[in-house]
Amino acid sequence: MAKQIRVLVWNENVHEQENATVREVYPQGIHGTIAEALKEDVDLSVSTATLQEREHGLTKDVLDHTDVLLWWAHAAHGKVENEIVERVLARVWEGMGFIALHSSHYSRPFQRLMGTSCSLTWREAGEKERLWVCNPAHRIARGIDRYFEIPNTEMYGEPFAIPTPDEIVFISWFEGGEVFRSGCTWKRGNGKIFYFGPGHEVYPIYQHPTVRLVLRNAVHWAAPDTEKWIDNCPQIDIENAPEKITTKGPRLHKKGEAGLR
Amino acid sequence: MAKQIRVLVWNENVHEQENATVREVYPQGIHGTIAEALKEDVDLSVSTATLQEREHGLTKDVLDHTDVLLWWAHAAHGKVENEIVERVLARVWEGMGFIALHSSHYSRPFQRLMGTSCSLTWREAGEKERLWVCNPAHRIARGIDRYFEIPNTEMYGEPFAIPTPDEIVFISWFEGGEVFRSGCTWKRGNGKIFYFGPGHEVYPIYQHPTVRLVLRNAVHWAAPDTEKWIDNCPQIDIENAPEKITTKGPRLHKKGEAGLR
Amino acid sequence: MAKQIRVLVWNENVHEQENATVREVYPQGIHGTIAEALKEDVDLSVSTATLQEREHGLTKDVLDHTDVLLWWAHAAHGKVENEIVERVLARVWEGMGFIALHSSHYSRPFQRLMGTSCSLTWREAGEKERLWVCNPAHRIARGIDRYFEIPNTEMYGEPFAIPTPDEIVFISWFEGGEVFRSGCTWKRGNGKIFYFGPGHEVYPIYQHPTVRLVLRNAVHWAAPDTEKWIDNCPQIDIENAPEKITTKGPRLHKKGEAGLR
Amino acid sequence: MAKQIRVLVWNENVHEQENATVREVYPQGIHGTIAEALKEDVDLSVSTATLQEREHGLTKDVLDHTDVLLWWAHAAHGKVENEIVERVLARVWEGMGFIALHSSHYSRPFQRLMGTSCSLTWREAGEKERLWVCNPAHRIARGIDRYFEIPNTEMYGEPFAIPTPDEIVFISWFEGGEVFRSGCTWKRGNGKIFYFGPGHEVYPIYQHPTVRLVLRNAVHWAAPDTEKWIDNCPQIDIENAPEKITTKGPRLHKKGEAGLR
């Protein structure tokens, strides 16, 4: 049997505690429902973690044993410790896949990976969303026809302040008249990143069969298929220069020094 | 007369104070020498600012009146206040050009715009660097032949942990045997970004006529030629939906609410 | 006064001759109406050319004096001589802007610049199209609000088989439920390329004030702001190598030879 | 056992017939030596084809059963039938990997996929080339240290007239002083494309163990991991519009019509 992909579903888990509607839609938390969707695929080994846990459940050890991290957040972006954000980024650069869901467009890890504000326009009217497949052979669109629909959704619309995606997998049409790049990929270091728009917490979106299929596909796509990128910034001693040279002029750094950060 | 481009040269100004060699090469600070190079172009209106000033010389008002910001830093990346970093990012997204010089590959603003670690390899041996023009018609390469040489340089080598550049203007060849993507461009929001490799503080690199030409060219390229991108994340009320719709299902947000960050 | 941009509007001019509806909408040909739209901008010097002219009106001399070429075609893609296609490509690589309009997604020059099939889905039902600005500060979107509408249009829908655009300026929403990347940019060599979706010949689309504004904006964006890229593939004689070397091993080519194509 | 990747090594096979030096280095043709290198990997099922065969050995049936096509050509680019070029492109867009080797930068399939001239500079002096890994975790660089060297090579130098690569895997340093983006990737439609610089026919480059490793890695990377992209340009009848609409205004096309090309 091929090795399972180790997936971690992270959720801030706030509105499930505070809002009756959300609790009703997601009695086990959004992370619980997403984890359940992923477990339908026997090739995935699925865990969950939440903001409230020690180190938000994202210890170095946990991340080191995670191939793909899914991130759902909305009300508590600012409560994620900066040290944990840095730790997540470092693992993405090594090769961990990162899937940002819905309102996580404003999460610290996603904003930091993009280098832009990640703003958009929005409307909470329970309108219909139709997601068009722009790249029919993409791994993330496998098993999906030309489009699929979500009957009740929060509208997220353009302009979406992201760097040009490497690939656009989905663009959404909204009943109220907007459009949105709702499925986009990027690479940062050795890590694959996927942003997926649907997922407002007052609607049962993660119960939608095609949304669940997209999540499973995305995990397969984002899983590292290569070695780790061990990031460092080595001083190459003059003796190790590929061509024989001798030092000319003054120096600031000592031999073997680690450099300034 | 066409409107002048307002350029601000920012320098941490640390090694000039602490290291005799650097002080000798740059008696008026690296910022002073770079400003002098830019002033050779009458279309540029040039100011300078340093880490030691109040708000590092980067008040909101100063940035609002800056078209292109050059950034030189090495020893004090961690001393730049986070609030100032955020302010610089916001102005880049609006449209301010940003030129990161040499060891600023590890500066906070550049790392934040890239979303990667920006690590590289390095060697301080005063060896020769030859910069090849990869894009002969690029604005930044104007007036430069097939290549130019810097007699004494710090080697910066691949792998350079950056997202794939939009354009590669220069690739460097080093006497010791390495190569480096030494002139790269990106866009983040409405802001143009250029990274330029040469500039180690113990060598008189910003006195080199072609390096100075590259800086002037880069300012012209990075200057905004468009309107500002005013970043916001507006709730679009249902009455303002382009298509007539009515609200379906529950809501989390109130009408007119600003949304969560 | 700044130098005018020299614009050439090329049109196959077939349906205007053969179809009464089209003739009524465009009595002076689509090229005539587009040229009229561009002439509203005094900074543009506008000419037209059609398939029926000698060398399709695209002699080497004409192209050498063109800064931006607009291309409209639908029924006669296969009638454009291959030699003329190659000539257009060579000028784009040098720096001439190229704007492909509507059904020109299947024109030879556009397909050749993209390297993909450029297929899409379509429906001719006179439905409404709403174009959303995805990049509010882009030169091509200048003066346009969050979106604009075309009351009757041919639907062009995803998947649009293009390489990932450098920038997406517009995405369209269609009354019938589809979406489309209707305003995209790329660069090939030194030439800027813009594809713009609207323009079906049975509707008065090039009479629409915002469409006309987009065309004028796009010409300004696509105009070369740099030197020409003179394309060649030179043999660098060993005496001209930047580093002193001597020939080792056998040779296939003679000194000064032009190389094989 | 996992399914083997079906690889086809295509070679124009001209200089091996006409030039004694080349024949000596590649007694079984360049395709023979490359095939041998690939066969060291039991996951690859390897065939060869040459220009001289009927339809250049690239019948529709052969291509339909090819996962990755390697292309070596130099003297006879213009002798490849246009129909075969189109057939290769169509298969790449469906998902077949394409690996262009050395002088194939000027081959019709590669030029057509790039949409640029693909020119470069060159020198045949048997000098040393050192290829630097720019992306240490890339599948194509697996098992390769920071760099590897080829003792005798033809220099290919910048500017290389290609569209910005999606990823740069290798950049070369040359003894004579030049640099070159010698390992680059792109995607066109559903097909992955890799250009690899080394391979001049008068030197035993395809006997070099690391070059052979790169070729095997590249085949694994370029092999399709997704469904085919079946390219078409369908008319969507009004009854099949996702939203209910009625036809407004005149029409040019009949229901069910295939559209114009």
Image (cartoon, coloured by chain):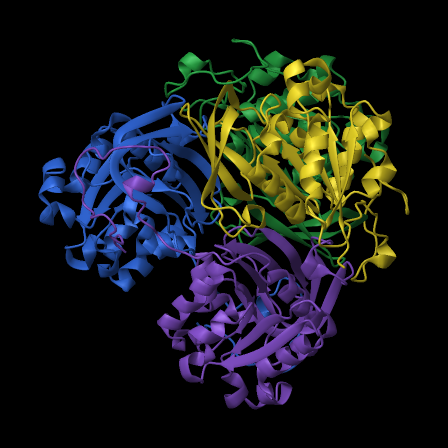
Chain colours: A green, B yellow, C purple, D blue
Compared to C40, does B16 lie above or below?
A: above
Compared to C21, does D99 lie above or below?
A: above
Residue drawn at the location 81% of the way across and 27% of the way down: B56
Q: Nearer the viewer, residue C36 or C165?
A: C36
Q: Is residue B234 visible?
A: yes
**Residue B210 placement (x, y as % from top left):** 56, 40
Compared to C152, does C231 lie above or below?
A: above
Q: Is residue A48 visible?
A: no
Residue drawn at the location 24% of the way across and 62% of the way down: D81
**Residue A37 placement (x, y as % from top left):** 60, 32
From the viewer's perspective, tell me whether residue D59 is left or right of residue C122: left
Q: Nearer the viewer, residue A240 or D227?
A: A240
Disc tally is 0
From the viewer's perspective, tell me whether residue B159 is left or right of residue B209: left
From the viewer's perspective, tell me whether residue C48 is left or right of residue B96: left
Q: Nearer the viewer, residue B217 or C123?
A: B217
**Residue A10 placement (x, y as % from top left):** 67, 25
Quadrant of res B205: top right
* Placement of the N terminus of chain B among the 4 image quadrants: bottom right
Compared to B60, does B74 lie above or below?
A: above
* Placement of the C terminus of chain B among the 4 image quadrants: top right
**Residue A74 placement (x, y as % from top left):** 77, 33
Quadrant of res C180: bottom right
Q: Nearer the viewer, residue B129 or D107?
A: B129
